[in-house]
């Protein structure tokens, strides 16, 4: 089966500043994709459906002039963004997020470690003491190195443990009024939806299964992202942040 690119997250090292909503020329030295591709063999919760792609029209085979396919999968696989309805029946769906929620400054916060580790408030404060406080409206990308275990499959990436966020750390980030939080794991918590609720009750999106954060040298970057406005959806597949469910470009600041 071909890989399906559903959401992309890309970091660009640029040599000029970028002003959004105005014509710009991006002079990029390099870019880093921070999203996994959807594919038939990838680590997911056993309860979720892996992606499938089936051609129902093929050039020269069915007499069609076009190749056309149907893609079937659970959108909570691969790199994706959640909407409040994911954990709250009264919460809004994906199209209600502000169009610019993935656009703007962000910080790459290197804390914790791969595997079974809970990121604490003290971990974040310690990072801030070295690199400066996380500011209002910044996106937060939590770099634990856990994405390096993606190719170890379900056992290595999920079953043996993954980094989570403590309640105190989540509340600390919410108090800073961050724009979104992104993690290198299938979820920011285990066996509950408490951390999801803390963030999304305050209109802060949760982005899961990002990767390649260890390749980013700068602590502060800018992101530019888009996501499909699917009415009634409680997820966002990304091209990003490739058509993986959301699209996010990250620009390093000099």
Image: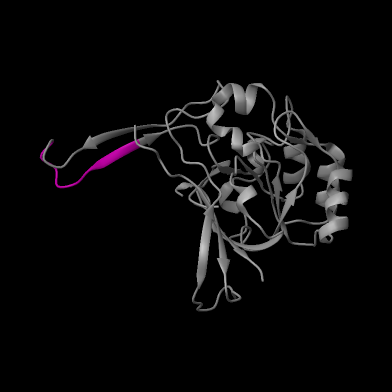
Q: How far from the left and from the top, in percent, is residue 113?
A: 74, 37
Q: How far from the left and from the top, in percent, is residue 248?
A: 55, 56
Is 69 on the left-hand or right-hand side of 248? left
Image quarter hosting the C terminus:
bottom right
Q: Quadrant of residue 47?
A: top right
Please name the residue shown 68% across and 40% down the image: 90
| Labels in figure, total | 0
Q: Is residue 67 highlighted in magenta?
A: yes
Pick whichever, 55 or 251, lies toward us: 251
User: Given the current orientation, which residue lies at the most extreme bottom position?
Assistant: 23
Is 239 on the left-hand or right-hand side of 64? right
Q: Is residue 254 highlighted in magenta?
A: no
Please name the residue shown 60% across and 32% down the image: 149
Relative to 206, is 39 above or below?
A: above
Is 194 on the left-hand or right-hand side of 126? left
Magenta highlight range:
62-70
Q: How far from the left and from the top, in percent, is residue 55?
A: 26, 35
Q: Is residue 105 visible?
A: no
Magenta: main secondary structure: loop
Q: Quadrant of residue 51?
A: top left
Please name the residue shown 61% across and 76% down the image: 17
Image quarter hosting the N terminus:
top left
Q: How far from the left and from the top, in percent, is residue 77?
A: 53, 34
Q: Is residue 161 visible?
A: yes
Pick whichever, 246 or 151, lies toward us: 151
- Its colouring scheme is one colour
């Amino acid at each position: 089966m071909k890989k399906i690119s559903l959401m992309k997250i890309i970091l660009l090292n640029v040599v000029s500043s970028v002003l959004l909503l105005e014509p710009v020329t991006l002079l990029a030295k390099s870019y880093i994709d921070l999203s996994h591709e959807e594919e038939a063999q990838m680590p997911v919760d056993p309860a979720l459906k892996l992606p499938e792609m089936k051609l129902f029209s093929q050039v020269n085979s069915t007499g069609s002039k076009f190749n056309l396919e149907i893609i079937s999968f659970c959108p909570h696989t691969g790199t994706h963004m959640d909407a409040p309805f994911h954990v709250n029946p009264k919460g809004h769906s994906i199209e209600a997020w502000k169009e610019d929620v993935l656009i703007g400054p962000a910080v790459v916060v290197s804390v914790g470690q791969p595997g079974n580790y809970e990121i604490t408030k003290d971990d974040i404060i310690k990072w801030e003491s070295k690199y400066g406080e996380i500011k209002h409206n910044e996106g937060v990308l939590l770099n634990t190195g856990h994405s390096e275990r993606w190719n170890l499959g379900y056992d290595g990436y999920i079953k043996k443990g993954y980094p989570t966020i403590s309640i105190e750390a989540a509340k600390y980030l919410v108090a800073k009024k961050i724009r979104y939080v992104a993690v290198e794991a299938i979820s920011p918590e285990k066996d509950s939806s408490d951390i999801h609720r803390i963030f999304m009750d305050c209109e802060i999106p949760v982005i899961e299964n990002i990767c390649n954060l260890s390749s980013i040298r700068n602590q502060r970057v800018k992101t530019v992202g888009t996501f499909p406005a699917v009415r009634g959806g409680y997820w966002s597949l990304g091209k990003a942040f490739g058509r993986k469910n959301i699209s996010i470009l990250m620009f390093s600041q000099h």
